[in-house]
Image: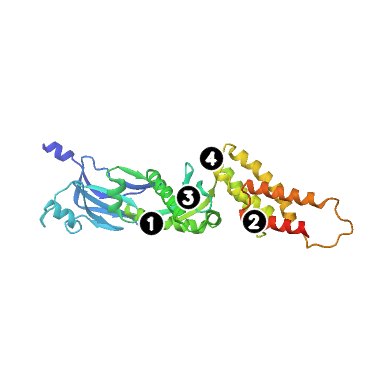
């Protein structure tokens, strides 16, 4: 190296990161052809950490504080470079700063519906949205697994990877839950805890800790949502009219497998409700009491009710047991 080149050569005596703006997780100090001055100052501010990388290997890691760069403060780098105690020359090294601040209000969502298996409704496609927060805690792991040698690594760069993890964890949480979807959707706090617990170990592998995870909404396909609304409207009463409506609503997830699709099942719901009203009247009729004016032809009325019962059975809206009981009740009235 000529004397002129040596004089023009620049040395770095202060290393620091001022973090202009939000959203940056990792930043490489711009060394170019510069060398770090022996005895220079390294400033690591609160909510930051820094690492020195020598020839691709992580050497020394620094937490918040002010450091004078000597062989005493760079023990690993000193060992890697085989420096003796009298070393006082400038040296080359890559220096990376990391933000350890809490990253709040990060949004997640499912771009496409996710198919999950529910114990009550079978295969269901759902969308979900929410927010989460995290922070970088294991800087060496984050550097090795995520940010690497990039000059700048931002929260947006990390978002896609984290969203994919969330979608996977959500599918597992639904699929392994022993709670029906209708109950899980009504208790989003439980769902948030399940997904957060599933995500924590994976986040830790990347040097990131999950601070909080919240499910804000879970949505269903329109047809299944209508079925769910119908079930909720049933309430606690167990009359046959409501039962028939609920049984028909349960069949909506299978609509795509039937020639009539959802429209055909919708017609079935209407027919089932009308038939069930007649059946309800038969089963809930008061005990036999003397009538001042006997019906003109009571046998025709019983025959009509039996036909309605058979139609209801053929449509699969009542079970064989329900049909047999209702039929026996009507026949008993016919023989009185």
Which of discs 3 and 1 lies nearer the camera? The answer is 3
Disc 3 element: strand
The furthest residue to the right: 292
Residue at image mark 3: 117
Q: Name the N-terminal-most of marks 4 and 2.
A: 4
Please give left or right for residue 296 compared with residue 206 in the image.
Answer: right
Q: Name the N-terminal-most of marks 4 and 1.
A: 1
Residue 32 vs residue 311, the one in the foreground: 311
Residue at image mark 1: 200
Question: What residue do we see at 55% from left, 54% from top?
Answer: 182
Residue at image mark 4: 257
Residue 120 vs residue 98, the one in the foreground: 120
Question: What residue do we see at 48% from left, 54% from top?
Answer: 214
Residues at marks 3 and 1, CA–CA distance in whole angstroms: 23 Å
- Contact, CB < 8 Å: mark 4 with mark 2? no
Disc 1 element: helix
Residue at image mark 2: 322
Disc 4 element: helix
- Contact, CB < 8 Å: mark 2 with mark 3? no
């Amino acid at each position: 190296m000529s004397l002129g080149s040596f004089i023009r050569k620049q040395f770095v005596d202060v290393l620091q990161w001022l973090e202009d703006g939000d959203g940056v997780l990792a930043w490489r100090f711009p060394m170019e052809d510069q060398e770090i001055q022996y005895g220079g100052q390294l400033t690591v501010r609160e909510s930051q950490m820094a690492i020195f990388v020598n020839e691709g290997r992580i050497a020394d890691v620094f937490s918040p504080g002010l450091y004078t760069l000597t062989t005493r403060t760079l023990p690993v780098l000193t060992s890697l470079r085989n420096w003796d105690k009298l070393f006082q020359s400038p040296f080359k090294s890559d220096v990376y700063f990391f933000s350890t601040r809490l990253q709040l209000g990060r949004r997640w969502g499912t771009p496409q519906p996710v198919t999950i298996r529910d114990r009550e409704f079978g295969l269901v496609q759902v969308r979900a949205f929410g927010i989460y927060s995290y922070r970088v805690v294991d800087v060496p792991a984050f550097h090795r697994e995520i940010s690497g040698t990039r000059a700048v690594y931002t929260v947006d760069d990390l978002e896609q990877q984290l969203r994919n993890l969330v979608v996977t964890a959500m599918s597992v949480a639904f699929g392994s839950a022993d709670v029906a979807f209708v109950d899980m959707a009504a208790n989003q706090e439980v769902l948030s805890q399940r997904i957060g617990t599933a995500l924590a170990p994976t986040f830790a592998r990347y040097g990131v800790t999950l601070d909080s995870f919240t499910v804000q909404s879970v949505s269903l396909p329109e047809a299944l949502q209508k079925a769910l609304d119908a079930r909720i409207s049933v309430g606690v009463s167990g009359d046959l009219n409501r039962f028939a409506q609920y049984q028909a609503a349960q069949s909506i997830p299978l609509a795509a497998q039937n020639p009539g699709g959802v429209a055909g099942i919708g017609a079935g719901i209407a027919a089932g409700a009308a038939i069930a009203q007649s059946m309800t009247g038969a089963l809930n009729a008061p005990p036999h009491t003397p009538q001042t004016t006997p019906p003109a032809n009571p046998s025709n009325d019983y025959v009509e009710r039996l036909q309605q019962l058979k139609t209801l059975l053929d449509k699969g809206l009542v079970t064989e047991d329900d049909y047999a009981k209702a039929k026996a009740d009507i026949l008993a009235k016919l023989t009185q």
